[in-house]
Image (spheres, rainbow, N blue to C red):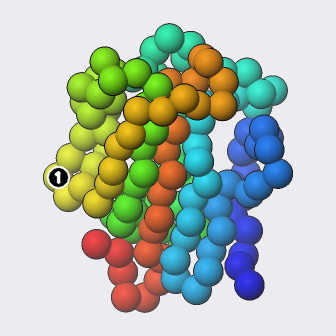
Amino acid sequence: MFAPIIPVGSSKPIAPYVPGSLVGETLYVAGTLAIGPSGETLHPGDIKGQTRFVIEQVLKVVEAAGGGAENIVYNAIFLKNREDYAAFNEVYAEFFGSNPPARYCVIAELVRDDFLVELVSTAHIGSSGGK
């Protein structure tokens, strides 16, 4: 069984899911997009703006489960455009630069044409710590 993690003020999901699922000390953060409270795409055409928003939303889920950025141990990144890779990494490094988690990144179509990035994260929350 898992405990759903839904931070206060979360945008309504565009499909049937919760932002996070805590199973023991492992937190699985759902695919996170630059979506606003009314379902609108935030920062259209702006990879840095979407990246920053998405990472901040992931961190809200992790914090609601009792952790922080240091507890994130794995990220799966989906970019719409290969050309956005360097700009994405600039923002990503602001959050994970000194001790980044394991990750992978693929170029893929996302659920709406105006989404440029999606991030899926796994965090270790608990007494034994994160990274």
Q: Is residue 120 left or right of residue 107?
A: right
The part of the image, by quadrant, that contains residue 114 is top right
Q: Is residue 15 left or right of residue 102?
A: right
Judging from the image, what secondary structure is the residue with disc 1 in?
A: loop
Total number of numbered discs in the rendering: 1
Q: Is residue 11 at least partly visible in the picture? A: yes
Q: Residue 71 in the image: x percent, y percent?
A: 39, 68
Q: Residue 115 in the image: x percent, y percent?
A: 57, 24
Quarter holding the N terminus?
bottom right
At a point 24% along the width and 55% down the height, the residue shown is 100
Q: Residue 37 in the image: x percent, y percent?
A: 76, 31
Q: With respect to residue 53, does 101 lie above or below?
A: below
Pointer 1: what residue? 98
At a point 62% along the width and 18% down the height, the residue shown is 113
Q: Is residue 70 left or right of residue 64?
A: left
The part of the image, by quadrant, that contains residue 39 is top right
Q: Amino acid at mark 1?
A: Ser
At a point 38% along the width and 61% down the height, the residue shown is 74
At a point 56% along the width and 13% down the height, the residue shown is 44
Q: Observer-nearest residue: 116 or 100?
A: 116
**In the image as oriented, which residue stretches furthest toward the left?**
98
Quarter holding the C terminus?
bottom left
Classed neighbour count for the residue bearing mark 1: other residues with Cα under 10 Å, few (<14), some (14–19), many (≥20): few
The part of the image, by quadrant, that contains residue 73 is bottom left
**In the image as oriented, which residue stretches furthest toward the top?**
45
Q: Is residue 94 at least partly visible in the picture? A: no
Q: With respect to residue 44, does 107 lie above or below?
A: below
Q: Residue 58 in the image: x percent, y percent?
A: 53, 50
Q: With respect to residue 58, does 92 lie above or below?
A: above
